[in-house]
Amino acid sequence: MSKEYLCGFNCWHPKWMQKFATTRTFIAVYGFLGTIQAIGFVYIIVTLTTLERRFKIPSYTTGLMLAGNEISQILLSMILSYFGGHQNRPRWLAWGVVFSAISCFILASPHLIYGPGDDALKLTKEFQLEGNQTLLFNSTTPVTLSKNTNRLCLSKPVEKECVEVLASILPIVLIFISQFVLGIGNTLYFTLGQTYIDDNTDKTKTPMMLGYAAALRTLGPVIGFGMGYVCLKVYIDPTKTPLIDSKDPRWLGAWWLGWIILGFTMLIFASLLALFPRELPKQQKKNKKEKRSSEIPKFMSREELSANKKSALDMSMTDVNDVEEIPRLKDMPQALMRLVRNKILLYNILSSVFYILGSTGYITFLSKYIEVQFHRAMAEATMITGPVTLIGIVSGLLISGKVISKYKPRASKLLFWNVIVGCCYMAGQFSYLFFTCPDGKMPLVEGGRLNLTTNCNAHCSCDGIAYNPVCYEATGVTYFSSCHAGCSKWNPKGRFYHSCDCAGNDGPPKITHAWNQYDHGAISTTDAGEIIEFVTANPELAGSEYETDTEPIKSRRRRAIESTTLSPDDKIWGKMIPGACLKGCGFGFLMFTAISVTINILGSSGRIGNILVNFRAVKKEDKSFTQGLILMMISLFAFIPGPIVYGKIIDSTCLVWTEECGKRGNCQLYDQKSFRYYINFTAMIVTFFGVFFDVLVWWYGRNLDLYGDRENEQEQRNKLKKSAS
């Protein structure tokens, strides 16, 4: 047997390895490789917001960076699939995985070049011990770290610093290059792997095998969410001791760590793929048997039979490259025209384009969507929603693959099911309009615009303070920051702010009784525990007021409280906790997760049918090239414009931008309602076109031979004709 059909590499083909040259073994390696690649796909989504904050990148620019993957697929997918489909596909796959590993190392390089950044280092214990900064929090006032970090209400403005938004555009360029290189690996994975499975598997078992491979790949996002959660819980510089925890909005996780792990893992899988033969032995025997039976006449002389046996033996020992014609570039346009004129294939591709375009907003900006709508931290949100949703997808793939292989439903039923799935998907997107946190807008929003200055915080000099929300639990109101809430004290033990002048709807409480700072008295409070007056113990002063005293009421009140003999805990008023208020958010988040799981189970159940249409609507020699065309179309019309369009939509709902040295950075706060409406309505409109093209696929492909039944019947008739002649 030729070495092209043996497991091994170059001249090394040990006998013990040949037992692994099976479809199941390839499915396992190919599927787990898909798991690793899917981990990378989800990991970049999970860490995307951290990347934006670290390098001050707006969402619109993020979409352009991620488009590098699709640009390489547009430029190279058809060429790679055309030539790779006629060569040793496992070897080409292995080289694709090597390119994917290289892209991981390139993506981690911005951290190696620029480090964690000054903002992150200033939040570490080591920075303060070097004498560069006082403690972040003390019992009274936390010192500002820069004009964009959170602090308490101060009586005078803090000197503004001017720090460049980006020291260089190199991080953006490196991220783009990494995605471009990744596109080469993804192209070879999708265009060659699935066709290799189909060509080495019985057509009736192809749905089940594809279901296994897709299910293994879908397990990747579950692990990817977990890896993102773990890495983002590690501080961006693991060698430093942070003074804040991961719940603080200023926290930056070790986004780069996962790429190092993934890069080395991909190199291992590349070496495993390179060991597989060009064609698996069982399929090779079947092909040669069919070839001999069709070429050797039934009635032959002994000499002719001996000559044919020798010829067949020589054929089996001949290198395949000497037999099959190497594809020529000039024949590629002719093959492309065959595919473009295929209505079923074209409509099926357009359907996939619109479905993917409709879901891009949820895929690329899932962390941001959950963070804005449900005030969930990035790591927490993706860890909860991601695995639950993707477990549903795996279930849908496995069940649909098993059902299709076992019951072989007619093409008309299988394709009409995709129409039903599309309608359910639109219904789910419509329901997202109603699920969010009930807090609505902040109390400082007026006339649709964010007004961060009011009477209660006008004296606090909060200009330039970054978004770091605090919650007043008594009313369930979220404030932009502790400074904007008028908070003047921080309790490090209880980790809450207090003495906040904006607490309550009527502003800070007022002193109505006369007082003397040297006298002792009693404190009057509201039901919520707010101190509203100081009653002096001196009967001579009771009921009188010092109208000539020019000291501000607020300062007199505080000195009055401090002059009492009450314990420190009894002096706390205007208490607020870090983070946005979450009261009532649980129901919306639960329903969002439940509906996401449901529609993703339904959506995954239709994927096997779409893949079968792509395989069965074209000739065998065009299958790999078809996958390249599909990848190019999806990249050109879905993956590239999707993140850019949705990024632009998201940026249009921004209320507060980071401003550094006159340059705009990332968005700090979004208009929650506009964000939700724009994203979901856009997704619904685009998905509608996907359903429309699914209807056309069903109409034109309802008689499609999905399982090779007509092909097998034709072969049987040909055999009967030859035997009868």
Image (spheres, rainbow, N blue to C red):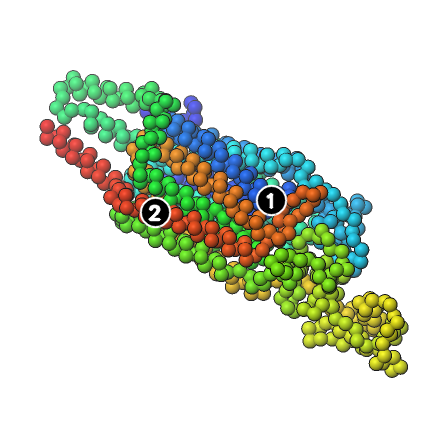
Q: Nearer the viewer, residue 707 or 519?
A: 519
Per the image, the residue denoted by label 2 is 694
Dot 1 or dot 2: first in sequence order is 1
Looking at the picture, does residue 28 appear above or below residue 553?
above
**Relative image position of residue 679 (x, y in whole percent):** 50, 52
Give x and y (percent) for residue 636: 45, 37
Q: Give the CA separation, mark 1 to mark 2.
A: 35 Å
**Residue 362 relative to residue 703: left or right:** right
Question: In terms of depth relative to the viewer, which is nearer, 225 or 430?
Answer: 430
Residue that lies at the very extreme toward the left in this rendered image: 724
Task: Identify residue type, mark 1.
Answer: Pro
Give the residue number, with chain letter if any, for mark 1.
58
Give residue 578's quadrant in the image: bottom right
Query: Outermost residue, front direction?
Result: 447
When the figure is inspected, residue 397 is found, relative to residue 22, above or below; the finding is: below
Asked if residue 535 is positioned above or below residue 34 in the image, the reply reads below
In this image, 43 relative to 707: left or right? right
Q: Residues within 10 Å of mark 2 (few under 14, many from 20)?
A: many
In percent of width and height, residue 460 lies at 76, 58
- Which amino acid type corresponds to the residue marked 2 in the rendered image? Asp
Q: Nearer the viewer, residue 692 or 402?
A: 692
Q: Nearer the viewer, residue 485 or 208?
A: 485
Identify the residue shown where x is 71% and y is 42%.
661
Mark 1: few/some/many CA within 10 Å (<14, 14-19, 20+): many
Residue at 22% from the left image edge and 21% from the top image edge: 309
585 versus 29 height, above or below: below
- Number of marks: 2
| Residue 570 appears in the rendering | no
Mark 1 vs 2: CB contact within 8 A: no
Q: Residue at left 46%, top 34%? A: 73
Q: Quadrant of the C terminus?
A: top left
Evaluate whether residue 111 shows in this view. yes
